[in-house]
Image (cartoon, helix red, strand yellow):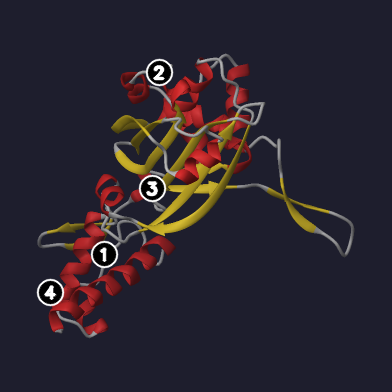
Amino acid sequence: MKSSVEPLKARRIYLLLRDRIVAGDLPPGGRLPGEPALAAEHAVSRVTVRRALDLLEKEGLVQRKPGSGTFVHDSRAVRPIVADLPNVLSHLIDMGRSTDVKLLSFSYVAPPEAIAESLGLKPGERVQRSVRVRLIDGEPFSYLTTHVPEWLGLTYSEAELAARPLLELIERSGVKTERATQAINATLAGPEPAAALDLEIGSPLLTLTRIVHDPSGRGVEHLHALYRPDRYAFHMDLVRIGDDGERRWSPALGRPRASDTAKTDKNKAGEKPTRGSRAIKQRS
């Protein structure tokens, strides 16, 4: 019984410390209490505390320095990507150019019934299925599974998909993407996504399912994306609208963000945006 309880206690301490680090209660560079102090505070063994610190270290939240202690890692150098929800399609290609991608699989298969229905495929029609991992500053942040109708998937190669954003390849074929429907939720990491994202199985993830359509309403891409919440977030600007007594929040569509305005000003001054400025657009 004790052998099964200890890992649960270690994960509880890991989550408590993680929440304190993310909330800023334990600032970057700050030293964590020593193992004896943490063991006494949580009424557990030092072995259990060590397991919790191992989890924090594997996630990159702390650094353990022999003879000095455990310190909160300064993660500000690797800021998370922040996707702008109202303009998510226009930012996808830009994101592809400011991050790196690792193609894990590429094949032509019969799609699951739900995906075939969402894309409006005919009976027996196949899809091009790919699994990719995106990285920011060398660290994985998303696990992407895409299904594209076979007739469209045949317009690009495996090598091209490993080097260029999928949306760019779709539009290169002459297909115009006009609208998309998407749903955002939360889930737990299964074995394959956990390994690809360098996480423990069962770690919390953000999940996004998006179906992209052309002007005729035909489905051209089904995307299922899993994101590490410590490296990716969704952003939406809101404004108050309506008459007194019926005021409500509404998306602020079409309003340039500060980073976009700054980039425009630089372009007017004759400066070209760098790779870094494109990345800032996603992270600001």
**Hey, what amino acid is under mark 1?**
Arg
Evaluate whether residue 140 shows in this view: yes
CA gap between label 2 and label 1 equals 51 Å
Q: Is residue 51 left or right of residue 119?
A: left
Q: Which residue is mark 2?
A: 156
Q: What secondary structure is marked by label 1?
A: loop
Q: Badge 1 local density, few (<14 within 10 Å), some, or many (20+)?
A: some
Quarter of the figure with the N terminus: bottom left
Q: What secondary structure is marked by label 4?
A: helix
CA gap between label 2 and label 3 equals 37 Å
Q: Which residue is mark 1?
A: 31
Q: What secondary structure is marked by label 3?
A: helix
Q: What secondary structure is marked by label 2?
A: loop
> Which residue sits at x=52%, y=32%?
122
Q: Please say if the residues under marks 2 and 3 sit with CB atoms less than 8 Å apart.
A: no
Q: Please say if the residues under marks 2 and 1 sit with CB atoms less than 8 Å apart.
A: no
Q: Residue 17 or 154: which is nearer the viewer?
A: 154
Q: Is residue 242 left or right of residue 139?
A: right
Between label 4 and label 1, give the one nearer the viewer: 4
Q: Which residue is mark 4?
A: 47
Q: Which mark is residue 76?
A: 3
